[in-house]
Image (spheres, rainbow, N blue to C red):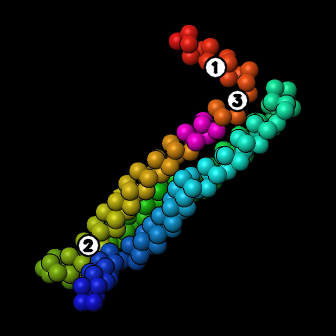
Amino acid sequence: MNWLYDRFYLIEHFIISGGPVLLAIALLLLLLWLLMIERAYYQFVLFPCYQKKLVSQWLQRSDRQSWFALQIRQAELAQSSLLLKQNMDFLNALIKMFPLLGLLGTVSGMIQVFDVVAVHGTGNPRLLASGISLATIPTMAGLVCALSGLFIFSRLQSRAKALLADLALKLVNDQQCSRLKERESRQ
């Protein structure tokens, strides 16, 4: 129990030394990770079930080569693309906000340092240290959050593209499949 209390104390001290901008970064980081976990759950658990259902419906069709059938195929692929890309633009925007919030923390911390210098001068380093920590900690936190989010985001984005390409290949009609095999054999 004492170990847990010590950890909470360290986190509280870190947030206080980083200022209110660090709290905003922490809340946005929580939102970012919740959305990334949701996207990962959709891609690894829900979309494969959706894909199986879609492919089985396509294979049960007697007509897979007419213009109408190809339009249905294109509509299903477009719908799948929308489902896979849902919230991805918002995730990208959140990731881009973290360095800007860190910069905001830097500016607000430097303003505090200048206020301390104006009132007390440069003779008291302890007063300057609190403003400097307000300036550097949010910057570091914003960059770390952006880097961690960027890595997972790029993995989710590439997986979404691979899932969509795999679905497109599974929905190819028989005539197109033979054409693709001919192209592969020529190369």
- What's under tag 3, amino acid-wise? Val
Determine if residue 40 is in view: yes
Q: Residue 37, how many percent across, how many down?
A: 50, 61
- For the residue pair 176 and 7, the one nearer the viewer reads as 176
Give how far across and how far down residue 184 sits, in percent: 56, 16
Residues 23 and 85: in front is: 85
> What kind of secondary structure does the magenta stretch mostly adopt?
helix
Q: Secondary structure at mark 2?
A: helix
| Picture residue at 81% right of the left edge, 26% below the top | 65
Residue 123's place in the image compared with 107, above or below, is below
- Give the Cα distance between marks 2 and 3: 58 Å
Residue on which disc 1 sits: 180
Q: Position of residue 98 (x, y in %)?
A: 43, 61
The reply to whether discs 1 and 3 touch (Cβ–Cβ < 8 Å) is: yes
**How many residues crowd around disc 3 within 10 Å: few (fewer than 14), some, or many (20 or more)?**
some
For residue 2, side relative to residue 76 (left or right): left
Q: Neighbour class for label 2 at 10 Å: few (<14), some, many (≥20)?
A: many
Please identify the residue farthest to the left as the structure is shown. Answer: 123
Q: Quickly name the residue at label 3.
A: 172
The residue tagged 2 is 133
Which stretch is magenta?
A: 161-167
Which amino acid does the dot numbered 2 rest on?
A: Ser
Spatial CA span between label 1 and label 2: 60 Å
Q: Image point 34% across, 65% down: which residue?
A: 141
Q: Nearer the viewer, mark 2 or mark 3?
A: 3
- In this view of the protein, which residue sits in the foreground, 9 or 132? 9
- Three-letter code, disc 1: Leu
